[in-house]
Image (tube, grey):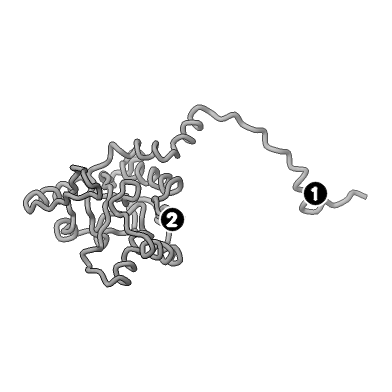
Amino acid sequence: MKRKPDSDSFATTVPAATPQKKTRSEKRNYQFTDVDSVRRQAQPYLLATAKFPIDALTYTWSIGSNRRVDRSHVKFLCGMFMRNRLERRAEENRLLVLCTQEEVDRMKNHCSKGELREADNGGSDSPSKWPIFTDWLSVNGQKAELMAGQHRVEALKEYVELTRSRRDELWWVCDIYNKGTPLPPDPLNPARILTTLFLLFRRHTAPRYKHQAAC
């Protein structure tokens, strides 16, 4: 009488998959996840770096789905902000934002009229200056898409409330990228490319707060 195999013994009868040699394109895709590579590939789409009001950011993406906010992680980050200090200007901690070229052009024009620029970018002798996009909503009428950094944004809101700071402290320095136009559907549309890049960026990097996750 033949023995009826149980689930474990049955699993052993399945032939092992033959290892496949990686193709050249697969090897390139592996390197594609490198943080520096992600930044380089996103660079052609960079429109501006600006001091941005977090109330003018939305967590909803035009392409793809963002993950839910983890309130326990927000609490952890807020504690980090309380124990240390905010590093909103550091390059490695910038938020990653998507919008259109037209929206940034309108803001730059608005800023040039009022000379809304910040001279101090956190360095003692750096000549860099950023536009201040405080009036984003009144100028453009809609929010920009936050691709990476939603937990830092929520933690900053709690931090400002706990420290009883002014609401004009609700800002973060953002790298702003061109999402192009959503129609017609195009696999090479900037928004599609950047969504993929930023998902990789979020997975393989983290701001330089100790033990802080990427978003």
- The disc, 1 or 2, on the residue closer to the chain's N-terminal end is 1
Residue 133 in the image: x percent, y percent? 18, 54
In depth, the one of 174 and 186 nearer the eye is 174
Residue occupying the far front of the picture:
124
Q: Which residue shows up at 88% across the image and 50% down it?
A: 3
- 48 above or below 155? above
Q: Name the residue located 74 percent from the left edge and 42 percent from the top edge.
A: 14
Quadrant hosting residue 57: bottom left
Kindly tell me whether residue 138 is visible in this rendering: yes
Q: Which mark is residue 9?
A: 1
- Under mark 1, the amino acid is Ser
How many numbered circles does the render carry? Answer: 2
Q: Residue furthest right?
A: 1
Along the horizontal axis of the image, is 139 left or right of 203?
left
Q: Nearer the viewer, residue 94 or 27?
A: 94
Q: Residue at x 45, y 39 (%)?
A: 33
- The residue at which mark 2 appears reads as 212
The residue sitting at 59% across, 29% down in the picture is 21
Residue type, label 2: Gln
For the C terminus, the quadrant is: bottom left
- Indicate the secondary structure of the residue bearing disc 2: loop
Q: Is residue 56 left or right of residue 215?
A: left
